[in-house]
Image (cartoon, rainbow, N blue to C red):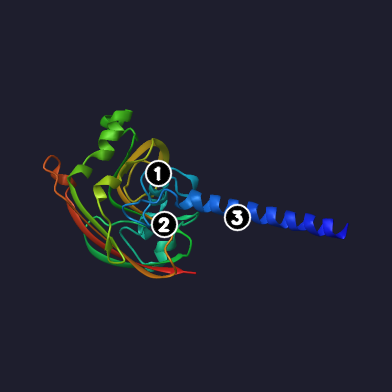
């Protein structure tokens, strides 16, 4: 009888271990399975990081970006302290630059994926432009200018290959634009779209990493969209 009890508890223990292993593997699979084969450590645009489609993360980045007050916005007025503004959830959002050369330092907790636009544009139908009143108008606006950029991204000395293949659009989404916003746009809740090229990094190992991006836009049709930027992030990943 005692031998039977011992065998029963052994079997229960083994079953519990197997279930735990399966759940652990499933979680890892959910986070990492869709990493890009061409560039290990980079999420594929067809992936679902943390169970959320890639395009939906672009919409979340856009909402994070627009809600930060102008006076402390990390695009225009960057400091290491401002890298942590309104960060929550499993993905850490980084702000880009639209001109010149800049180096930034950002401390990020371990386990966070990292999302940074290289060349992107977002539009919403805030009733100020009749060309953006329709879905097709929003798509045309969001994609305008993104075809004419020369882009490059390097993580820890390793160049990210075939950046053109990472062009992605969000689905249509509702964006909440506050009164104080970096674009000085009309406040409200609007239908929106974002298109462009992003670097979406899997969680980095603890330590210091360097993410370097460059972009140059020479648009022959809309020269007002032309710009060049050189941005380096020194990412301090804290365990």
Which residue occupies the extreme left position in the image? Answer: 220
Give percent across and percent down for residue 153: 26, 58
Q: Alpha-carbon neighbours of circle 2 within 10 Å: few (<14), some, or many (≥20)?
A: many
Which residue occupies the extreme right position in the image? Answer: 1
Q: Give me the disc on residue 203.
A: none
Tell me how many marks there are: 3
Residue at which label 2 appears:
202
Where disc 3 sits, the SS reads: helix
In primary-sequence order, the first of circles 1 and 3 is 3
> In this picture, is 14 found above or below 134?
below
In primary-sequence order, the first of circles 2 and 3 is 3
> In this picture, is 183 found above or below 97?
above
Give percent across and percent down for residue 177: 40, 43
Residue at screen point 27% across, 29% down? 130
Residue at which label 3 appears:
21
Residue at which label 1 appears:
59
In primary-sequence order, the first of circles 1 and 2 is 1
Q: CA distance from mark 2 to mark 3?
A: 22 Å
Q: Alpha-carbon neighbours of circle 3 within 10 Å: few (<14), some, or many (≥20)?
A: few
Give percent across and percent down for residue 103: 28, 67
Q: Nearer the viewer, residue 66 or 145?
A: 145
Q: Is residue 190 visible?
A: no
Q: Nearer the viewer, residue 121 or 199?
A: 199
Q: Is residue 213 visible?
A: yes
> For residue 191, what is the image quadrant?
top left
Q: Quadrant of the N terminus?
A: bottom right
């Amino acid at each position: 009888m005692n031998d039977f009890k011992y065998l029963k508890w052994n079997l229960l223990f083994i079953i519990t271990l197997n279930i735990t292993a399966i759940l652990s593997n499933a979680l890892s699979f959910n986070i990492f399975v869709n990493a890009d084969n061409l560039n290990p450590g980079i999420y594929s645009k067809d992936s679902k990081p943390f169970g959320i489609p890639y395009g939906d993360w672009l919409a979340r980045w856009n909402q994070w970006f627009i809600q930060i007050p102008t006076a402390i916005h990390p695009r225009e007025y960057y400091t290491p302290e401002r890298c942590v503004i309104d960060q929550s959830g499993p993905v850490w959002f980084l702000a880009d630059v639209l001109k010149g050369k800049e180096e930034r330092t950002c401390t990020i907790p371990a386990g966070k994926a990292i999302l940074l636009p290289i060349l992107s544009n977002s539009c919403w139908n805030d009733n100020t432009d009749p060309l953006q009143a329709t879905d097709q108008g929003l798509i045309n606006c969001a994609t305008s200018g993104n075809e004419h950029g020369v882009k490059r991204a390097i993580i820890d000395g390793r160049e990210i290959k075939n950046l053109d293949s990472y062009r992605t659009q969000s689905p249509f989404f509702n964006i909440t634009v506050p009164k104080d916003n970096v674009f000085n746009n009309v406040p409200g809740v609007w239908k929106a779209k974002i298109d462009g090229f992003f670097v979406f990094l899997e969680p980095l190992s603890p330590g210091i990493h360097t993410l370097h991006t460059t972009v140059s836009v020479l648009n022959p049709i809309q020269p007002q969209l032309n710009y060049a930027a050189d941005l380096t992030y020194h990412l301090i990943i804290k365990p």
